[in-house]
Image: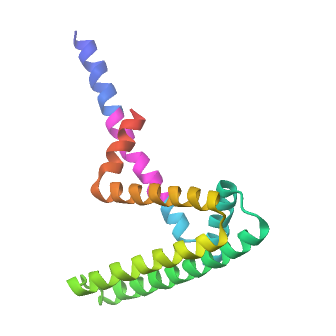
Amino acid sequence: MKRLILIALAFVSVQAFAQPNQGQKNKERAHKMHNLSPEEAATLQTKKLTLHLDLNEKQQAEVKAILLANATARKAKMEEMKAKKESGELQKPTKEQRLEMANARLDHQIAMKAKMKKILNEEQYAKWEKVQAKMAQRSKAGKKGEGKKRMQKKTE
């Protein structure tokens, strides 16, 4: 009986230590992606979209230009935030600032959708929208902590 309890305790402790490691791997992967230059990030994203949506050469060039502009703007914003954080100027945004940021983000998403609709055919655009919706859902789940629960269920 004592052996059975010891074995059960050993399994529980091993599993408890195995779970946090998966989250660490995800953080490392995300950190590596942030270290890419805008050109590298745009190239990777374009290749992923090419595989997923079967883009032709012209579409690849147009999509890469859009993604490069987005990556450059994102990198500049990250550098700006990093500089503010290091100088101690970074403060919690006010309600008006949060509203302004949300509006700017949504305007950017609308513009991105319009650009992609011009470049992609109907079937490709439908696939792209489906992927965007799935990514938005994952983002919301991650912010609420549901993504972690889902990952733990998959690993069990």
- Residue 97: x percent and y percent? 27, 86
**Which color scheme does this rendered protein use?**
rainbow
Instruction: Give residue 35's quadrant in the image.
Output: bottom right
Residue drawn where x is 47% and y is 76% of the image: 110
Residue 47 in the image: state x and y as whole percent.
Answer: 69, 62
Answer above or below: position of 141 versus 97: above
Membership of 17 in magenta stretch: yes
Q: Residue furthest front?
A: 122
Q: Residue at x 76, y 72 (%)?
A: 58
Residue at image point 41% right, 82% down? 82
Q: Residue at x 27, y 20 (%)?
A: 6
Q: Is residue 37 visible?
A: no
Q: Main secondary structure of the magenta part?
A: helix
Magenta segment range? 15-28
**Which quadrant is home to the C terminus?**
top left
Task: Judge whether residue 25 is colored magenta.
Answer: yes
Residue 44: give x, y in percent of width and height.
65, 65
Q: Residue furthest right?
A: 57
Residue placed most toward the observer, 121 or 34: 121
Q: Is residue 117 left or right of residue 59?
A: left
Query: Vertical placement of 82 versus 3: above or below?
Result: below
**Dividing the picture into quarters, in which one does residue 84 lie?**
bottom left
